[in-house]
Image (cartoon, helix red, strand yellow):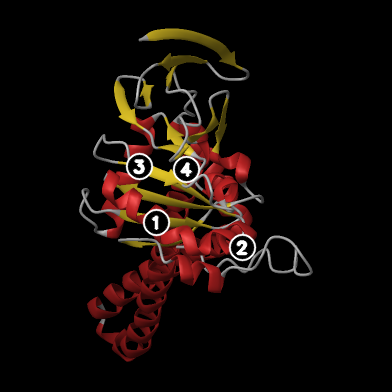
Amino acid sequence: MALVFGSVIPNSNTLCLALTNHPTNFVFCGPSVSYVPSLFYSHQRPSSFPTIVCSAANKPSSSEISSTAKIRSEVLSPFRSVRMFFYIAFVASGSLGGFIALTQLIGALANSSRASEIPEIVKGLGIDIAAVSLFAFLYFRENKAKNAQVARLSREEILSNLKLRVDEKKIIPVSSLRGIARLVICAGPASFITESFKRSEPFTESLLDRGVLVVPYVTDGNSPALEIEETDELASRRKRLWQLAPVYITEWSEWLDEQKRLAGVSSDSPVYLSLRLDGRVRGSGVGYPPWNALVAQLPQVKGIWTGLLDGMDGRVL
């Protein structure tokens, strides 16, 4: 087995090493080793040399992600901060009014000559308590929605910084494909990836017309056999649909585990996630991707509807 040193990838701390005379591809990411699928023609040698990628990932800090997520949250909900400010102001006003009414009630109860004022004071106190309760509820509901949105945007920012291998010399972040491709992430054992590959074959042209690219993530360490017949007219199209592969496997694993935990899915379940053109998650599920549904629901990225239907990717999850 021979080692061939490649070049350092520009704008990243990545050194690519090519392994020749070895039947299996694998990528070394930090402290872990994980296999990645190799596309090859069944009557030819593998289309690419097996590759080891050694790198210290330029992972953004949690503070950077949080700051970006908060800015995006403000853009998406520009009046939320104004509403929350008024909710707090109304709570403070009601609390002050309730405190004053309470002192008046104590004084009236202590002075029999003011007994006639008690019903009116109690009425005012009840209104203040109701107002404080209402605006406190609205504030906490708004704050809960804000935290949920920031958490979702933070996960999207983490996803956008995960790396993909396009070929032996090109590694890009997921964010580079925003506005260009709709990614479908298939995560599961090698057998699940192989079957997903086979099921996508009849929809190859339609999926590519809609900007779909597949990211196969193997969870059991085996290498799926994604075979393409040399005589197949769609060979190059099939290879393009499945050309991406995740790198820095530990980061991908952490992100997928978090998505599964939030969805209440067991960590060993095979899943798929479908992304919008803007990089946000539009759909997910356990099992094989619904290729026919994606073709039916997604507009084409080229042609007369280009630009007009860019946002018709479905609601964000």
Q: Which residue is mark 1?
A: 198
Residue 264 at least partly seen? yes
- Nearer-N-terminus badge (3/1): 1
Q: Quadrant of the N terminus?
A: top left
Quarter residue 25 falls in? top left
Q: Where is residue 166 shown, x and y percent of the image?
A: 55, 34
Identify which residue, 89 or 2, lies in the foreground: 2
Would residue 230 be found to the left or right of residue 217 on screen? right
Q: Amino acid at mark 2?
A: Phe
- Nearer-N-terminus badge (2/1): 2
Callout in the foreground (3, 4): 3
- Nearer-N-terminus badge (3/4): 4
Q: Quadrant of the C terminus?
A: bottom left
Disc 4, SS: helix
Identify which residue, 283 or 290, lies in the foreground: 290
Q: Which residue is mark 3?
A: 225
In this rendering, the answer to whether 131 lies above or below 282 is below
Q: Which residue is mark 2?
A: 79
Q: Where is residue 202 shown, x and y percent of the image?
A: 49, 64
- Nearer-N-terminus badge (1/4): 4
The answer to whether marks 3 and 4 mark residues whose Cβ atoms lie closer than 8 Å is no
- Nearer-N-terminus badge (2/3): 2
Q: Amino acid at mark 1?
A: Lys
- Residues under labels 2 and 3: Cα distance? 51 Å
Question: Which residue is drawn at the image coordinates 53% and 50% (left, top)?
Answer: 238
Q: Amino acid at mark 3?
A: Ala
Q: Which residue is mark 4?
A: 159
In this rendering, the answer to whether 128 lies above or below 23 is below
Callout in the foreground (1, 4): 1
Give the total of numbered labels. 4
